[in-house]
Image (cartoon, rainbow, N blue to C red):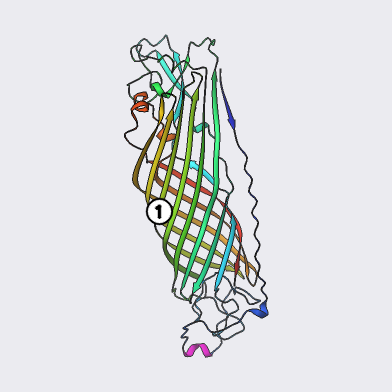
Amino acid sequence: MVRRTWKFKPAALLIGLTLMAFSHPALVSHALADGCQCGAGCVERCPAAEPVLETLCGQSLFWHDPCGNGYRDREYDCYFHQSTPPRWYASAEFVPLFRDQSGSQTFQALAIEDTSDTETPWVRQAVLGTNDFNSDFEPGFRVLLGRALGDWYRIEASYLGTHSWSDSAEVRYNAGAPDNGNLLSPLSNFGNPGGLPGLFDLTDDEFNPVVGIDGNTSASIRFKSEMDNGEVNLRRRVRVVPDPQVRAETSCLVGLRYMNIREMFEYEDSNENSVTVNTDNDMFGVQIGALAQFLVVDQGWIDFEIKGVMFFNDASNRIESTLDDDPLPAQRDRTSFMGDLSLTYNYQFAPSWTFRLGYNAMWLTGVALASENFIVDTSALVTGPNAIDHSGRLVYHGPTIGLVFVR
């Protein structure tokens, strides 16, 4: 009988945000934007474009041209706008993320003898692997601080992190079961030392369980993964052609991004063999991106943003095993890539406050994952690894909800 058990460590995150600021419509000025050259057409009243953004005056991050190429005002001349560009702005968001690792690895197999097959009588089946992990949404947060540099540029700094995923899985085997099988370890290539990887059927000559490694009655695996991310970006508005039917704005950005992914993977079996793998990815790179904004209702708009990042990845691992007393480190520089997409609905419910609700997804390639750096060759565990596996792929995705404060 095979039994799997999982342990899920619940996590809780309490975000406290205190903003010592007070805003009122009377405090918001409608001064001319810096360097605005509207031209003769601005002495006349603006067209009554629909919808307008903020009917009580105020400031928002819907980026408009102060000369009238963005949304316009029903009541005032072109020199004035009911919602003015910001000087400073800050946001805080609750961001639970799901960690999705590409592929699956086997860490215990069951060998069953098929007496009806004289050529390959040994059938191996996976009974424990990374697909048994339950990687649920884990809480985290994102904070952003921005400063407007005139009408066309903004500089922003943000942090996303405190996410931590962990889980464990176990398999147990009753040695007295009548199916004449046993549990095989990855340290022996599942009863086929020196053979090709894979759980294909074996002949009697190929099936060679290793005493003290195979023949387990139980085995367990567990992992832990943590992620932190920081960005500094310069954003520039891109002029769009006015359209009375579509109220849209666009901007592009260029910036620097840092991401760190730390992982631990541990394997143990009933023969008292254990292997622990720790990996670390220190990634620093340049990113570019674009933001499109669509005004859909009064005071409400949709943000769609896409970013692409090329990282310089200082990847490293450290392997500890009961087969060798000395830890085995490895390190390699690697180029990693990431794509970042977000879709967010914004609603400005007060002159300086905006509510945000959306979804964020990040695709990352070229990282060293702990489970994928597990070494199945016992000789390499003693002599040391000759390389680090940095071909891992991850997807982080989840909803976002938060507030934006603008002054």
Q: Is residue 129 visible?
A: no
Q: In front: 88, or 308?
A: 88
Determine whether the residue tagged by mark 1 lies in a helix, strand or loop.
strand
- Residue drawn at (45%, 37%) of the image: 278
Which three-letter amino acid code belongs to the residue tagged 1? Phe
Query: Is residue 9 shown above or below 402?
Result: above
The residue under the point 46% across, 54% down is 340
Stretch of the chain drawn in magenta = 39-43
User: Residue 397 vs residue 328: left or right?
Assistant: right
Which residue is at the front of the view, 129 or 286? 286
* Res 281 quadrant in image: top left
Q: Quadrant of residue 17?
A: bottom right
Whether residue 49 sits left or right of residue 209 in the image: it is right
**Residue 150 percent location from the top left of the image:** 48, 77
- Main structural element of the magenta stretch: helix, strand or loop? helix
Residue corresponding to mark 1: 284
Is residue 269 visible in this depiction of the protein?
Answer: yes
Q: Which of 254/383 is in front?
A: 383
At which x and y percent is residue 62? 54, 70
Q: In the drawing, does residue 22 fall left or right of residue 291?
A: right
